Each structure stands twice: as structure tokens, then as C-alpha cells.
Image: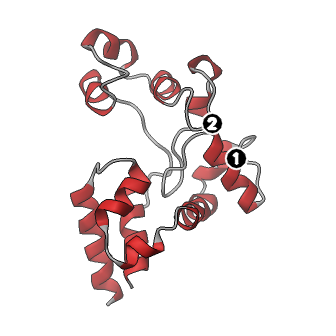
Amino acid sequence: HNQQAMFIGQCSHECGNFRILEENLNYKAATLMRLWPKRFPTLEKANEYAGNPKKIANSVYSSRMGNRDENSGDGFRFRGRGIIQLTGHSGYFHCGKALGVDFVANPDLVSTPKYAALSGGWFWSTHNLNSPADALDYNKVTKIINGGLIGLDDRIKHVQQALAVLA
């Protein structure tokens, strides 16, 4: 049950209890500075982007994860979608190739229930998350999914709830 519970719990955190299949990115300046201190080192810089999800995504996801520069629009085009928030051109390309769907040409498909779930399963599988999930290694699974430990307590809570239901 550990693998199933970890998948359900992590995904539940990532997509707001399976209600939000697309990253919001509508942040205030203070939040931008906290989440991306290198990109938004000053309040003045953060204020240029605050409240503009498209501009934020194009900045924070530029020139990484297979995305081109900020002006390309790739950051917003390939923003987080799905139950594990597939993000970046590379993720969309490889996931789409595996599922036989052109997510690069049709990125919004990843925020539909079918592909939100399938992309989550693809991510889980390609990142070999069953082994750390079996061990209930919350930190390792969270770091692989999130890049850090954001929301760790909430993730643990969701996994524990899933374990209780699956028991």
C-alpha cells in the first residue's frame, strides 16, 4: 500500500486535492522573493512581475528544462500541469512521446483529467519513485517531485490519510 498511498498523497498535495490541474503562478512580490530569491533579489524587481502569471512563468522557467529564453514564451506555455505538475519543454516532449500525444503542440491537454493522470504516472515511473515510496521516504520522494521540501508536512498528512484508507 505504501506506493499507492505515496502516489495519492503526493499528487493530492501537488494539485490541490485533485482540483487544480494547472499551476497558478499569480504571486505577490513577497512570495516571488521567497520562492525564487535569485531571480527576484529586490522588492523593486519582484514588483515588476507580481500579479502577472505569464510574465512570472516566462521568467522563472526560462532557459531551463528545455525551455528557450524568457521572450520565447516557453515558460508559460510549458508551465506546471497535471497531477504532478509536468513542467518545461523537455518534460512535455518526453512525456508526450511516451504517451503517443504531441504535448509540445498541445500543452493544454496535460491539464485535462485523462492526461493529468497519465502524465503523473509517467513522471512517477520515469523517476523511479516506487522504491523510495515503499520505504516511506517522504523527503526523497518530495525532493524528486518538487525539487525541494515545499509542503512536506501537508504531503505527509495526505500520504497518512491514503495509508489509512488503503489499510
Question: Looking at the rendered structure, which numbered label has been put on residue 93?
Answer: 1
Up-down: is 123 above or below 149?
A: below
Q: Secondary structure at mark 1?
A: helix
Q: Residue at x 44, y 75 (%)?
A: 131
Q: Is residue 128 visible?
A: yes
On the image, the x and y values in percent for residue 124 come to 52, 65
Mark number displayed over residue 12 = none
Using the image, tell me which numbered label, if any, was put on residue 66.
2
Q: Amino acid at mark 2?
A: Gly
Q: Residue 128: image x %, image y %?
A: 51, 67
Q: Residue furthest top?
A: 44
Cα separation, mark 1 vs mark 2, equals 9 Å
CA neighbours of label 1 inside 10 A, class few (<14), some (14 to 19), many (20+) = some
Q: Residues within 10 Å of mark 2 (few under 14, many from 20)?
A: some
Whether residue 3 sits left or right of residue 91 in the image: it is left
Q: Give yes or no for contact between labels 1 and 2 (Cβ–Cβ under 8 Å).
A: yes
Quadrant where the image shows the C terminus: bottom left
Q: Residue at the location (38% across, 12% down)?
A: 48
| Residue 147 x %, y % | 39, 47
Q: Earlier in the sequence, mark 1 or mark 2?
A: 2
Question: As displayed, is residue 105 above or below residue 95?
Answer: above
